Amino acid sequence: MFSFFKKKPAPADAAPPPVGAPAAAPALAAPPVAVLPVIVPPEPERRSWVDKLRGGLRKTGSSIAQVFTGTQIDEALYEELESALLMADAGVKATEFLLGDLRRRVKESKAGDPAQVKVLLAAAVADLLRPLEKPLRVGEHAPTVMMVVGVNGAGKTTSIGKLTRHLADSGRKVLLAAADTFRAAAREQLAVWAERADVPAQQAGSVEIVSQADGDPAAVSFDAVVAGKARGCDVVIADTAGRLPTQLHLMEELKKIKRVIAKAQGGAPHEVLLVIDGNTGQNALAQVKSFDDALGLTGLIVTKLDGTAKGGMLAAIARERPIPVYFIGVGEKLEDLQTFSAREFAQALLD
């Protein structure tokens, strides 16, 4: 298993103090900052994963690729492409933007056949998605506190488990808060992932879990942050209950959890991550808007992109609410959750 993390290089040695000057007290070592991704998987492993992504997006890409099977670049091609993008749930705003950008690229490059236009579209999609391609930073705070939210069935707890394993593999000490106290067996599911994520004793990384039987979600989150600070944890991750953004009373519970975490650590959670199901299309954009308005999202994890016909929804998010996509998932295995690359996604979509 590869690691996503890499410590920043040590700063250059400072100049010696002047002769006769009092010796300076030894400086405390700053905690290492891990930026995700820095270390990428070996090329064959990454290629294998990109192949999975390509296969997962085939339903989306095939409908778009059919537009370029003709021999002419005319208005009919652009009209067919508009329909294909809308069917892929790219949304009206992103579709209009991509068509305008594509027309400009075709004119500037003097493209002569539809195959060239397809290549230009891939470049346009990659440029549109590039603002979403930002790394998750771990290590600037002790601990880094993450709050993970999402609707039921999006893959929230599973994604937490995969992320936890990557963190533990990189030597990070992780504490999980089982703040999903509404769902039966939620604590047990998280505990199973914690057990899977634990690593051998000779490595620095380890995983702990804080929970309360029938406890208040905000109280569990508070206890987890306090325990994480006391135990010297690198990361605290709060797994919250899944809920629809239309469930206003439950959304208020999430706001309460965020406020309680802020009280426990003296500031808002460093990361508020929304897990969204890639099969939900335009509904995913609605979720992003609602959760962002309520909580102030810092990043997204997009799951279940294997076999979706609605992969264009990332274009809609990029155009209307460009929140970083830290990870995308194309399967159930640990290695199927990988960092997001705009270029790889665009190529997989239109290959």
Image: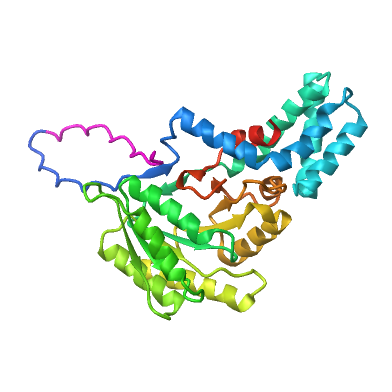
Q: In which quadrant of the rendered view does residue 250 lie?
A: bottom right
| Residue extending furthest toward the left | 20
**Quadrant holding the N terminus:** top left
Coordinates of residue 126 in the picture (x, y in percent) = 65, 35
- Total numbered circles: 0
x and y percentages locating residue 280 in the rendered image: 69, 56
In the image, 47: left or right of 99? left
Q: Which one is in front, 127 or 159?
A: 159
Residue at 78 percent across and 26 percent down: it is 117
Q: Which residues are magenta?
A: 1-18
Asked whether residue 11 is drawn in magenta, I would say yes
Q: Does the image show residue 267?
A: no
Residue 256: image location, x then y, percent: 50, 75
Q: Is residue 196 above or below residue 176?
A: above
Q: Is residue 284 left or right of residue 185?
A: right
* Residue shown at 9% from the left, 33% from the top: 19
Which is the main secondary structure of the residues drawn in magenta?
loop
Report if residue 91 is visible in the image: yes
Viewer-nearest residue: 172 or 18: 172
221 within the magenta span: no
Q: Quadrant of the C terminus?
A: top right
The residue shown at (69%, 60%) is 286
